[in-house]
């Protein structure tokens, strides 16, 4: 439910106006979404900073990543500022409901429950991904999904991957599950042999494995999924404004340019899987 303090300062918004840019591509202008922002003329974004390359701290100590670049581009095109607030993944979506953020940008998986939820607004896909096995390159005991039964898996606390993995494995196969706040702690336990494998998405760990030859990501990707941004439940106009830009970015190649920059390869949006039912 929207919080009382947010509702008390909201005004009744007028009709949405769609403006076309003259620079060769369409730009969406929604005049009234600013009435919904937590801070005047600023989109407040919750992100972890610990899920490379979606959101991370770069070599110069700055917040960086695909989600960060995307939200900077969105804010620029909407004519507002952007402010990032870092929090562990498990606190991001509850923080959205509690009015700590306008948007959560941290590789949010578009699950059935999230798409149907009254507690947030999931936007249309901004990337295609799936779940995969991440393990030590030296671990010869795991060469595929048939080998993970009964073994200890690490997952990010509150993430969607564990349910996707559980659904893709035979009943009774999943072993002990250990939860972590993010990649850093989980990969350390993998290297110290406290877990056998990591149950995560495919693209993020693949980016990290390219920089760390002690870790490998198996190529058998399961449970194709889409990810995007999540917007506060009573920010309808803001959600529509950002979603219109995401649609534009999918069409004009902006998303794939960013995806290629951060993940090393584009995705084929014509193969976007259907939303989970």
Image (spheres, rainbow, N blue to C red):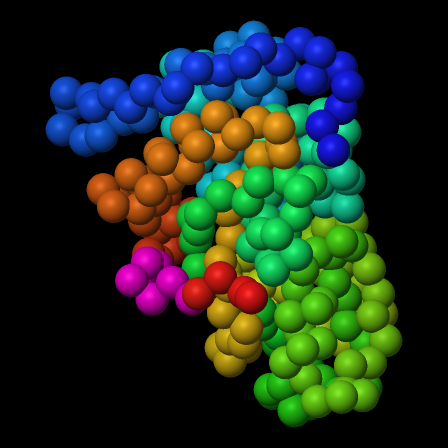
Vertical side of 220 occupied by 266: above or below: above
- On the question of residue 57 being in view, the answer is no
Q: Which residue occupies 70% across, 17% down?
A: 6
Q: Residue 254 sits in which quadrant? A: top left
Vertical side of 152 occupied by 37: above or below: above
Q: Residue 171 sits in which quadrant? A: bottom right
Give the image location of residue 34, x and y in percent. 50, 14
- On the question of residue 115 being in view, the answer is yes
Give the image location of residue 113, x and y in percent. 66, 56
On the picture, is 271 further left or further right than 159? left
Q: Quadrant of the C terminus?
A: bottom right
Q: How many marks?
A: 0
On the picture, is 108 further left or further right than 139? left
- Answer whether residue 272 is magenta in the image: yes
Q: Which residue occupies 70% across, 56% down?
A: 159
Vertical side of 71 occupied by 203: above or below: below
Vertical side of 271 occupied by 158: above or below: above
Residue range of the region highlighted in magenta in the rendering: 267-273
Nearest the viewer among 140 and 223 is 223
Give the image location of residue 38, x and y in percent. 63, 16
- Answer whether residue 1 is magenta in the image: no
On the picture, is 271 further left or further right than 116? left
Nearest the viewer among 183 and 248 is 248
Nearest the viewer among 191 and 120 is 120
Q: Which residue occupies 66% across, 27% down?
A: 101
Give the image location of residue 125, x and y in percent. 44, 51
Q: Which residue occupies 74% across, 33% down?
A: 1
């Amino acid at each position: 439910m929207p919080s009382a303090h947010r509702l008390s300062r909201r005004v009744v918004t007028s009709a949405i106006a769609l403006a076309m840019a003259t620079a060769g591509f369409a730009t969406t202008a929604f005049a009234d979404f600013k009435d919904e922002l937590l801070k005047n003329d600023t989109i407040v974004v919750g992100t972890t900073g610990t899920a490379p390359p979606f959101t991370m701290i770069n070599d110069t100590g700055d917040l960086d990543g695909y989600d960060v670049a995307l939200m900077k581009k969105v804010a620029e095109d909407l004519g507002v500022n952007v402010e990032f607030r870092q929090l562990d993944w498990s606190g991001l979506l509850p923080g959205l409901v509690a009015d700590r953020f306008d948007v959560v940008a941290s590789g949010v998986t578009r699950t059935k429950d999230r798409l149907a939820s009254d507690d947030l607004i999931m936007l249309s896909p901004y990337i295609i991904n799936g779940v995969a096995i991440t393990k030590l390159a030296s671990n010869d005991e795991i060469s595929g999904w048939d080998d993970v039964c009964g073994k200890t898996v690490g997952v990010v606390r509150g993430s969607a991957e564990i349910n996707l993995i559980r659904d893709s494995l035979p009943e009774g196969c999943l072993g002990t599950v250990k939860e972590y706040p993010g990649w850093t702690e989980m990969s350390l336990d993998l290297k110290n042999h406290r877990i056998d494998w990591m149950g995560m998405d495919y693209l993020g760990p693949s980016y990290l494995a390219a920089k760390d030859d002690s870790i490998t990501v198996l190529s058998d990707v399961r449970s194709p999924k889409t990810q995007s941004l999540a917007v506060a439940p009573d920010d309808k106009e803001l959600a529509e404004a950002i979603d219109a830009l995401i649609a534009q970015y999918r069409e004009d190649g902006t998303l794939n340019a960013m995806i290629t920059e951060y993940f090393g390869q584009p995705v084929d949006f014509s193969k976007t899987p259907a939303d989970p039912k």
